[in-house]
Structures are given as structure tokens and as C-alpha cells.
Image (cartoon, grey):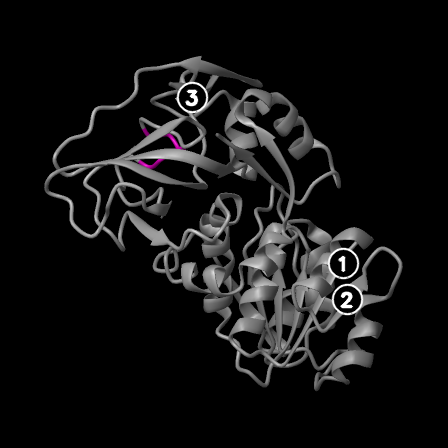
Amino acid sequence: MRAAIVTAPDTTEIQEVPTPSVGSNDVLVRIRACGICGTDTLYIAIGGLPPRHGCMPIGHEPAGEVVEVGRDVSGIAVGDRVVVNPMALADDIIGNGGSAGALADFLLIKDAVRGRSLEVVPHHIPYEVAALNEPMAVALHAVNQVAPRQSDQVLVLGAGPIGLGITIALKSRGVGHVVVADILPSRLEKALKVGADAVINSREDDVTARLIELHGPGESMWPNRSGTDVFLDAAGVPAAVETALAAAKRGATLGVVAVHKEPVSMDFMNIMSNELTIIGSMGYPSEIFEVTKDIVDNWEKYQAIISHTFDLDDLQGALQCVATPGAADKVVITLS
């Protein structure tokens, strides 16, 4: 079978590798779609992770069709359409330094348990949409971390795939007013399409002033604060954090889910005097299949997040698309 393997820094190859054998507790999935994540590009840049540096399989956002089921596995049948938890086995994480990646024709789910390592989705859900399950679990965990109330007013900074997923999750749980800020008009259009109540072009507009128009003024010992209750950083640039903290009223919350590649300075007098809460978000401790129902119920909204699909044989074109700033939202590899 074919599999995408990181063979050296900045080098990924499609190689022929043995198709896995299925044990009594395992399930074999024919991969039909797999998203490309920013961490995939990081692994490629550094040549993979130990102990598989230089020979690391990648891909951890899969959806596929069950083609073989071990005799001791229950609740899963051949022909089922499934999404996968790549972190089900802590010592063998799929596509993140483990022995297998999901950018391949087949993926072996070891010690398969429905609801823990994989879950069934209806056949009418397109495979490429089902492949959003893992990154959308990341987005849902970010929302769960800040625990918004329905009465809250929220600003999402960044309208990439995670920011759009956060927007859908916020509206699915009934949050009253969600604003999305980004510098790309095309992404702001998508934010409105998936349910944002308003958008701000942060390249052209004064974000704080616009927030005050939308959310009213906020209580603070400092002037020019907005009534925004929750800020979610899905941008990963210092300006996003700086913008949120400059606009935050007393008691506001800032959630950080984006990966920051450089340190961000903060005015701790502002944080202290306004009693701000800053909370991080990483992965999906419990959300990997919690998000699945919402994807099934609202799959057409989630489909808008996908901007490009590529065949596995055109992996290099897909990676170039991902690496080009502003060129793509979510890129998904499809396999026939």
C-alpha cells in the first residue's frame, strides 16, 4: 500500500509499505480522506520525530471505510464509515511519531473500541467532511475550556479552520453574539457563512472600536474597553493576543488554542487590575467523538471549511498549497 513518509528535513515521499495484518482486537480501515494539519508541516520541516526521525509516517485527521474487523471487536462492521481517534493509544499515536500514519491507503486501528478509538458516521456524510472530526475536536475543546454562557459576547481571532470550527461550536451551543476577526476577506466571508454574527477586518479596522460598537463599552479602570466577555485566539500571532488584552474589560477571559512560535509579552498590570483569565487549550481530552454528532447534524456548515482537495499522489502540491500564506483554508487528501 502507499503511505506518506517523512524521510528527511523538508522531504516527504509516497512509499510502498506492507499492508497491515489484522489481529483479533484490531480493525483495518481503508482511508478515504485525511486532512493536512499545521503540525504535519512542522514534522516535515524537522524531518520527523524521534524515534522515527527520517522515517516517520504522517497524517492524523482520517476518515475511512472499515474493510476488516478482528473477531473480538464488537460494534463495528465491514462497510462502516468511521472517524478515528489518533491519540487512543498513548504509546503509539497515529501520525504523531507513532508506527503508522493516516496519509496512507490503509490504517490499522489497534485494540479497537468503538467510542474510544473510532466511531461510526452515517453514509451520507462526505468522507472529506468526516475527516474534519479531529481538528474540530480541537476547536470544541477550546470552547469547552472557556465555558461560554449563552448570554456571552465573544470574539474569535483568526478565521482559519480552527477559528471557523470554534465559531460553529459557539453557535451550536447557543452563544448569543460571536464576532470573528481576520485579515483575509475570503475567510471573513466563510465566518459569516458558518454562523458568525459579525466580522472585523483587523487589517483595515480598529478592532477595539468596532467591538465597542458591536458589544458596547466594558467596565474597566482603563479607557476604551469593549463589552466582550470571551476572546479566543485561533491566530497564533502576537497581535491577536495584544488586541484581545487591549480590548478586554474587567473579568474577561482569553482562551489560547493557536500555536505561538515566538514569545508574547503581556502587561501584567492590565491582567491583574482587570482580573483577566487566560486559559490554554491543547488537543481534545474528551471531545474527539463529542464533536462527531455536531458534524453529522451540521455537515454542510463544516464543509465550508474545506478549500482544497488533492489526491494522495499529488501530496507535494497539497503541501505547497498548505505552506502558501493565505492560499488555503483546510486542505484534505482524498483517496479512491
Q: Quadrant of residue 224?
A: bottom right
Disc 3 crowd rating (10 Å Cα; few below 14, some 14-19, many 20+) is many
Q: Nearer the viewer, mark 3 or mark 1?
A: 3
Magenta highlight: main SS: loop
* Crowding at mark 1 (Cα within 10 Å: few <14, some 14-19, many 20+): many
Residue on which disc 2 sits: 199
Q: Which mark identifies residue 3?
A: 3
Q: In the drawing, what numbered circle is on residue 188? A: 1
Q: CA distance from mark 3 to mark 2?
A: 40 Å
Give whichever of discs 3 and 2 has the lower sequence position. 3
The structure residue drawn at horizontal position 43% and vertical position 61%, both measured from the top left corner, is 291
Q: Position of residue 222 (x, y in %)?
A: 75, 79
Q: Residue at x 45, y 41 (%)?
A: 61
171 shown above or below 263: below
Q: Is residue 15 above or below residue 155?
A: above
In the picture, the disc for residue 177 is none
Q: Amino acid at mark 3?
A: Ala
Q: Secondary structure at mark 1?
A: helix
The spot of residue 294 in percent (x, y) is 47, 64
| Residue 277 visible | no
The reply to whether discs 2 and 1 touch (Cβ–Cβ < 8 Å) is yes
Residue type, numbered disc 2: Val
Q: Is residue 94 magenta?
A: yes
Q: CA distance from mark 2 to mark 1?
A: 6 Å
Question: Where the N terminus falls, by quadrant?
Answer: top left
Residue 150 highlighted magenta (yes or no): no
Residue 287 in percent (x, y) is at 39, 59
Q: Which residues are magenta?
A: 93-98
